[in-house]
Amino acid sequence: MKVPQLLPGKVVVVSGVGSGLGRTLAVRCAQAGADVVLAARTASYLDEVAELVEAESGSRALAVPTDITDPAAAEALSAAALDTFGRVDTLINNALVEPPHTELCDTSMDDIRLGMEVDVYAALRLSRLFTQALSDSRGSIVMVNSSVLRHSKRACGAYKIAKSALLALAQSLATELGPDGIRVNSVAPGPMWTDKVKSFVGGLAAARGMSLQEGYDEVAADMDLRRLQTPEETADAVVFLASDLARAVTGHCLDVNCGEYHH
């Protein structure tokens, strides 16, 4: 589908530009008209995504290798974005470390702590660094959360702790930064049909003598739409929240899960 030009002339910073949703977020924002700043630790991968962005959209892309848990590196990211583009309109906090899927009593404190460091503290760090620029542009922050907020399944406790804290962070920032004209929202995607999920579902299906399609149908049976959303569909929700169409929306968490959970 042709992506509507919802972000013309905007500058969007995306953290956590990995092979999954981060890559899609960067491309989708660029297709919507924005120039993008790409942040992740692996320089070669960032360069690849930057080339893809420019080839598919015509927008400009700045790749900034960044360990967002490092305060100096995060400051360098902020400086590079403003030096290059002169403004920032949206910060998308997408970086995450997913803790081991073990029960809380069996999960190390170091693993729980790392999830908080990347998912929450680093998101706060970047949000603080970009606050003045976002105030100047009357811009927005979008936190990429997870449908883990909506359940308490066994072995998801450490992940839910981090993502629940990220939601609280977004809501608190919405209240604190609202007077400066900055909107802060979240998206909570359910499982997306990515290569990683295909591999996981395919492995479970094969172990039970099922085909990949049968495994998919079993997972999708829990969704009202009887399917899993794509990364592009999640990214479209982020683009909406970053756009002027959502200019009166702040402090909100938008579930994107094909109807797996209602909130």
Image (cartoon, rainbow, N blue to C red):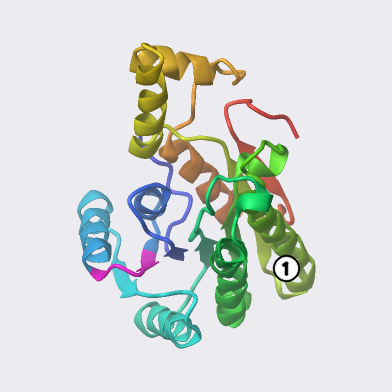
Mainly helix, strand or loop, the magenta region?
strand
Extreme residue in the front direction: 106
* Depicted 150 relative to depicted 167: above or below: above
In this view, the residue in front, 223 or 157, is 157
In this view, the residue in front, 244 or 254, is 254
| Residue 263 as seen in the image, left or right of residue 260 | right
Query: Which portion, as a residue range, is magenta?
Result: 36-43
Q: Position of residue 28 (x, y in %)?
A: 39, 48
Q: Position of residue 73 (x, y in %)?
A: 42, 83
Q: Residue at x 42, y 48 (%)?
A: 21
Secondary element under disc 1, as helix, strand or loop, is: helix
Q: Position of residue 146 (x, y in %)?
A: 60, 45
Q: Residue at x 58, y 74 (%)?
A: 134
Q: Which residue is mark 1?
A: 173
- Check disc 1 and give the amino acid type: Leu
Q: Would you identify the image quadrant in which residue 262 lies? A: top right
* Depicted 178 relative to depicted 129: above or below: above
Q: Would you identify the image quadrant in which residue 212 lies? A: top left
